[in-house]
Amino acid sequence: MFRENMATDWLGSIVSINCGDSLGVYQGRVSAVDQVSQTISLTRPFHNGVKCLVPEVTFRAGDITELKILEIPGPSDNGPYGDFQQTDLGISGVGFPGSSSQNGTGKLLKKPGSSAPQSIPRRTDMKNQDVATSPQQHQCSKSYMDRHMETLNQSKVFRRRHNSWSSSSRHPNQVTPKKSGVKNGPMKNKDDECFGDNIEEIPDTDFDFEGNLALFDKAAVFEEIETFERKSGTRSRGTPNERSSRYRHDENILESEPIVYRRITVPQASKEFCTDSGLVVPSVSYELHKKLLSVAEKHGLTLERRLEMTGVCASQMALSLLGGPNRLNPKNIHQRPTVALLCGPHVKGAQGISCGRHLSNHDVHVILFLPNFVKMLESITNELMLFGKTQGQQVSSVKDLPDTPVDLVINCLDCHENAFLRDQPWYKAVVDWANQNRAPVLSIDPPVSEAEQGIDAKWSLALGLPLPLGERAGRVYLCDIGIPQKVFQEVGINYHSPFGCKFVIPLHST
């Protein structure tokens, strides 16, 4: 096959050798032709467009199906083994038999049934090595080479993208310093060693994620797991068709036993509420509520303790309604909130005065309205004495109340008893002022009957257990006033605290 006169002409030429479907297409520069053994050697070979790991391969004439000369070295080339990286290999492509080289001369040796040659991609920075393998040896390591070359291609694509990102992130006026040293020499820059491999051809095909994911049948795997767990008696982890439970930020996802939502039972409940966590809180009648407070006072929960606890809880709720830390901080000292506290001459009024004292201690401007009476309850007298030590303002006439809207109105005028107070002129005047002020209203322990409420409330605060309040009470909140559990049991109430970590919780109508 290889004649003597052709051997010298082919040295240094770039050729494409088709070895059939089993070995594929090889391309490279001819380094040796042996007429005796009928072999041809290529240096820096490419196999099916991918650079081989070995620097030189040797082919027998019997393995070659088609041989095509892509380029013949000219007289200006440096010997038969000129610089391979300076040759433009992109002039001949796949599927164009007989395409000419740079010199316009192309030779094609073809056997029947051969395929078209493939173009050689340009590569740089390749080093000479002295290892040669036969096509049979190369075929044995083909699978390893393919895997290795795929990893190399992915890393080189990343390096090329890294270089493009680095160049695009430079400042427009930034000057890139020139790199010293000769390429491939001892003074090569470290950056060139890591990122200097230029890639002109990037693989066009991306990794097929959908195709590989389709190989995994999740439904079959979950069905197998569920069948195994059902047979073994273990708890099922769920299937893809099951909807996962949604939990609140304060809920425990590990449930050791079923949740009991009805933990409070009363002899007779006309209305029921529920908390944010779903616990049912039934209402109690005013007679049962009054009996509960009387038994608690007998066991040591005196009126003074109850007033203090109610004042603390009511003031905490009022501070939250006024804006909490967003409103009450040293930077907003010029925007102190104003609260109008409307109190009557009874225990409910004493609860309001206690709340006003705590609000004033928290730098809230409190205006306390309390009508003048010849004789006051002892609880009111004690609370007024403490309130007088604060910066709060006390008035007894409606004319002294603010003409402009306030931030919050706290209503403690109404009482469960002494309904005759609603007929007093001062009561009517205060109710008219509150309705015209257009400020939101918070009622503390409002009465059950809506006819006894002269002011519509936006929020209402119940004590211990709620009363069956109507629509005019607004949104109902419940506060813990410190009644022990056994006191509830003594009056016939099976009680379990619904407050959790709080002292004031919202209630929702069921």
Image (tube, helix red, strand yellow):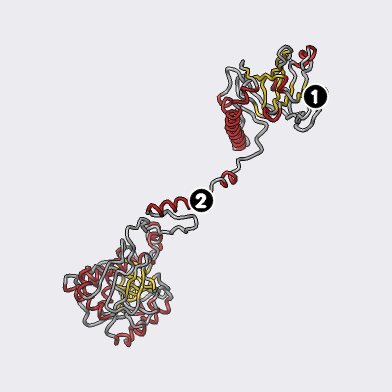
Label 2 belongs to which residue?
220
Side (left or right) of 98 relative to 263 = right
Q: Is residue 479 above or below residue 127?
A: below
User: Do we see residue 368 in this rendering?
Assistant: no
Side (left or right) of 429 relative to 307 = right
Quarter occupied by the C terminus: bottom left
Q: Amino acid at mark 1?
A: Leu
Image quadrant where residue 191 sits: top right
Q: CA distance from mark 2 to mark 1?
A: 56 Å
Label 1 belongs to which residue?
108
Residue at the image position 27 percent from the left and 85 percent from the top: 418
Q: Nearer the viewer, residue 461 or 110?
A: 110
Residue 140 is situated, as x and y percent measured from the top left of the image, at 60, 25
Q: Is residue 446 above or below residue 244?
A: below
Side (left or right) of 271 relative to 106 = left
Q: Is residue 423 above or below residue 359?
A: below
Q: Amino acid at mark 2?
A: Ala
Q: Of the numbered discs in the image, which one, if any, rests on residue 23?
A: none
Q: Nearer the viewer, residue 402 or 247?
A: 247
